[in-house]
Amino acid sequence: MKYISEFPHGIMIHYVHDENNLPVGQGSISVKTFERILKFIGTENFLEPIDWLNKLEKGKLRKKDLCITFDD
């Protein structure tokens, strides 16, 4: 299975936990899940936030351009 992007977008992660980094709560994903997301989408498809914003401003974002952010 391959990640297909119809438009440029961001993926927001609220909190990543492991057995030493608790509490686990709403919006929290495990390190293992986070790694699976990165492998599925492909780290090569993520832009640095400043690069994503610069491309947005210039109207040069491509369908596959993604940015990952962490809330809080």
Image (spheres, rainbow, N blue to C red):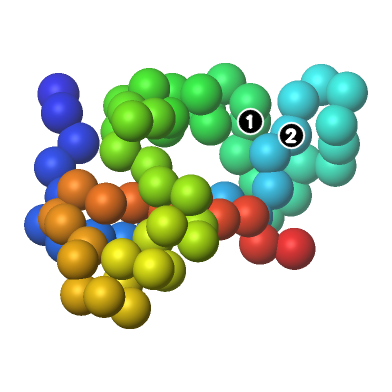
Give the x, y percent position of residue 28. Answer: 66, 46
Give the x, y percent position of residue 35. Answer: 51, 24
Rendered residue at 39%/60% (across/down): 52
Residue labelled with disc 1 = 30
| Tag of residue 45 | none
Marks counted in the figure total 2
**SS under mark 2:** strand
Residue 4 falls left or right of residue 26: left
Residue 50 falls left or right of residue 15: left
Amino acid identity at mark 1: Ser
Rendered residue at 77%/41% (across/down): 24
Quarter containing the C terminus: bottom right
| Tag of residue 17 | 2
Rendered residue at 40%/47% (across/down): 47
Query: Mark 1 touching mark 2, by CB under 8 A?
Result: yes
Specify the quadrant of the image occupied by residue 41: top left
> Where is 24 relative to 6, above or below?
above
Residue 12 visible, this angle: no
Give the x, y percent position of residue 32. Answer: 57, 21
> Where is 50 relative to 3, above or below?
below
Marks 1 and 2, the one that precedes in the sequence: 2
Give the x, y percent position of residue 11. Answer: 43, 54
Residue 44 falls left or right of residue 67: left
Rendered residue at 61%/39% (across/down): 29
